[in-house]
Image: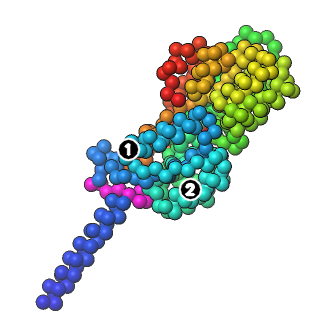
Amino acid sequence: MKRLFKGKKILLLMMSLVFLLSACSSSGTGGQTDSSSSNGAGKSSDKLVIGFSQVGAESEWRTANTKSMQNAIKDAGHELKFSDAQQKQENQIKALRSFIAQKVDAIVFSPVVETGFETVLQEAKDAKIPVFLADRAVDIKDDSLWVTFLGSDFIEEGRKAANWLVEETADTEGDVNIVELQGTVGSAPAIDRKEGFEEVIKDHPNMKIIKSQTGDFTRAKGKEVMEAFLKSDGENIDVLYSHNDDMAIGAIQAIEEYGLKPGKDIKIIGVDAVRGAFEAMAAGKMNVTVECNPLFGPQMVDLIEAHLAGEEIPKRVAVEESMYTMDQAEELLPTREY
Ligand code: AHR
């Protein structure tokens, strides 16, 4: 009788353990998924809660990127917790801490600058919340603090811009004076686009960057800084290399107001390939834009689902990109998605 009672107790204990375990795994919190909830392709079909800390709304590119992420998360049936950092690192750190406190299943993070995120990323790791880097990388030794980086090769973008210029000015005698509008100070695209561009032009001693300043990736700042460049060096500027199209578009306005012809008197190189750049190129005011594709929301959702389903994913996933010149603009403008 006593033995039978003891057996029943063990059975009950085992049943509650099984119940507890299945309850934990179906919540998805902490990156665990139940294999019974797999959708057959090895990915989780659970509804996930995804926190997305975005840089801001500084450019056409950023707006397109935010939409792409929001739509992809919604279309996949997951819940999004969104935070716009307004280009401020302290806002991003706060947002990440709030996602951790809310125990989200995954964090997507597009860091405004490369450094200074170790502590908060360690907190996410301690809470077993996987972090996915979107668009911009971090400069952190411990790469176990993030799962993967999905984004563009910004150094290559800088090289492409410079290679276009080398070809374009192949027959030019004398110096080619370049002014540079840099992106946000300390951000990966600003650092890398400068590096890639300089790497190429260093082999062409006639190419000189005569002025270089940040325009913070915005049209307004791009215009303001270009006005200052024109004021001091107006007649000497041959080329503007702008780390994004928005700053280039702001600068084009400054050049016109100054009385010069953008695209002719001053050659304009941008990065992103946003609609505004295609419009400027179609109007003959901008020469070239190097593509930086922001439409990677669906790819990011796939990566999150794959990781949470226990699949191995690469540490770096590149976005495919091209480059567009003035003569292609009119034809391609109607096809541009952003
Ligand atoms: O990180 C990508 C860059 O950020 C884009 O090139 C720029 O437009 C944006 O604001």
Give coordinates of residue 205: x percent, y percent: 78, 21
Residue occupying image coordinates x 57% and y 55%: 95
Give coordinates of residue 274: x percent, y percent: 57, 28
Residue 164 in view (yes/no): no
Label 2 CB-ligand 1 distance < 8 A: no
**What amino acid type should be assigned to the residue bearing mark 2?**
Leu
Give coordinates of residue 327: x percent, y percent: 59, 12
Give coordinates of residue 157: x percent, y percent: 61, 29
Which stretch appears magenta? 28-36
Marks 2,1: beta carbons within 8 A: no
Residue 236 part of the magenta-drawn span: no
Residue 29 part of the magenta-drawn span: yes
**What amino acid type should be assigned to the residue bearing mark 1?**
Ala
What quarter of the picture does the N terminus occupy?
bottom left
Q: Where on the picture, by quarter, is residue 329? A: top right
Assign a secondary structure to mark 1: loop
Whichever of callouts 2 and 1 sits on the residue coming sooner in the sequence is 1
Residue occupying image coordinates x 52% and y 57%: 99
Residue 65 in view (yes/no): yes
User: Mark 2 = which residue?
Assistant: 96
For this rendering, which residue is in front, 52 or 317? 52
CA gap between label 2 and label 1 equals: 22 Å
Q: Which mark is residue 76?
A: 1
121 horizontally vs 234: left or right: left
Q: Where on the picture, by quarter, is residue 237? A: top right
